[in-house]
Amino acid sequence: MKKFMMLMVAGLLMAGSVNAKKMQAHLSYATFYAATSGPYVETYLAINPASIMFKPINDTAFRGIVEVTMIFKNGDEIAAFEKYNLRSPIVTDTNNLKISLLDQKRFLLPSGDYTFTLLLADKYAGEKPYIINEPISISYHQDSIAFSDIQFIDNYRKTTSDNILSKSGYDLIPYPAEFFPENKTVLTFYTELYQTSQVLGTNEKFLLKYYLKSVNTGRILDNFVRIKRMETKEAVPILQNFNITDLASGNYLIIAEAYNKNNELMTKQQRFFKRNNPRIQIDPREVVALEIQNTFVNKLPEDSIREFIRMLNPIASETERYFIENNRENQDLDVLKNFSTNSGSPGRPIVRNKNGTVIIRWLKLPIKTMVTLWKKDMNQTGEKYLSNTENPMLLHPATTIRRLIRTKYGIITKPKTIVTANSFLHP
């Protein structure tokens, strides 16, 4: 978790929103390495033009301007600085804006730790600038294999003339947000892998694996795993995509991994994103009967089964929560037993559809282990069981904070490091 949080702070994720009286903006950034010039940071800024003021430049045309200031400090020393006006395209109707306000910058910075400060001011609104301060860590070494950060791409085209959007022969139009709505059906990403030829040798082979993983459940999504055979280079460009039309709502990680010929993991990189896809829901008719006669869950009475389903909310994805909230009270009992039973993978309750495809696999602890932990909590707090010792269901264990955390994350030990990040722009 420490590594993941540090990555979120250090460059994979800084998608904040400006939600004041007017301005709405998204900012993200990524670090890369160029053999000729060294490490650099790219910033990707998108501003909703409908959230800024426009002023007439003549009788029929209007324009909006945002004043942007970016500062990178290493300690008390300013390592990079840029201040400029981001001008909107000229429009004739400010009530029907069909334009975008997107900007990308590059800053050459040596490996090290920096504080990045961004100031945004609507030139015509007369408001105070919005300010964000965020730590950025840059670390690339010539003797170790490493990925760059992962950049989300809105679209791309072959480069005809080098420009600030150009990488590896393509112009990459950035997608600054981490949120993918229903109408966004393709997730395209770009990353680079460095120093493979220096470490593994020239023209050697290695494997690239990239996949999606649910943050809510910790589960790798089988339908979103790709493996490619690659050849070593000084810098290996990776431009790939996933069709996410049928990806359910939830929080996810996109993860890239590199393996040597001995199938040993050499390095990995990841980035968070959020999907909203209300079209995809769990159909109770797709949940078929499993062998539940000899399972733990089959021994529970009906009221306990329905209550147990409710208590699984802390570890459910958004789609699964929808299923729970809409089916717990009135769904057929066998469907609910199948929803929470174990079949196949030890301690990993799953549900398959009628074709045998796994559609739910989400418990981080075996059911018996969770109940044992809940019993222990009951003994410590002096709470009582719902009925008697023959009934393993407890009185609303998911409403106790400690049990909710245990259900969601497993057995928790005292953290050694706590990392916080404020990724929202504020006056």
Image (cartoon, rainbow, N blue to C red):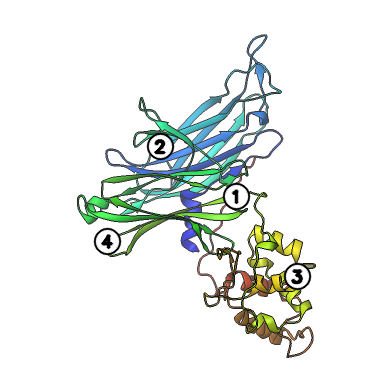
Q: Which residue is mark 2?
A: 107
Circle 3/circle 2 CB separation < 8 Å: no
Q: Which residue is mark 4?
A: 261
Which residue reaches farthest bottom?
A: 389
Gap in angstroms between the C-alphas marked 4 and 3: 50 Å
Label 3 residue SS:
loop
Which residue reaches farthest left?
A: 202
Q: Tell me which numbered mark, 1 or 2, is placed earlier along the sequence.
A: 2
Residue type marked 4:
Lys
Name the quadrant of the C terminus. Answer: top right
User: Crowding near pointer 3: few (<14 within 10 Å), some, many (20+)?
Assistant: few
Label 2 residue SS:
strand
Q: Position of residue 138 (x, y in %)?
A: 39, 49
Gap in angstroms between the C-alphas marked 1 and 2: 30 Å
Q: Tell me which numbered mark, 4 or 3, is placed earlier along the sequence.
A: 4
Q: Which residue is mark 1?
A: 275
The residue positioned 72% from the left and 76% from the top of the image is 397
Q: Which of the two residues, 272 or 380, is positioned nearer the viewer here?
A: 272
The residue positioned 67% from the left and 40% from the top of the image is 19
The residue positioned 50% from the left and 69% from the top of the image is 416
Q: Tell me which numbered mark, 4 or 2, is placed earlier along the sequence.
A: 2
The answer to whether residue 221 of the structure is visible from this angle is: yes
Residue type marked 1:
Arg
Residue type marked 2:
Phe
Q: Position of residue 163 (x, y in %)?
A: 39, 28
Q: Tell me which numbered mark, 3 or 2, is placed earlier along the sequence.
A: 2
Label 1 residue SS:
strand
Q: Which residue is mark 3?
A: 332
Q: Which of the two residues, 329 or 268, is positioned nearer the viewer here?
A: 329
Gap in angstroms between the C-alphas marked 1 and 4: 34 Å
Label 4 residue SS:
loop
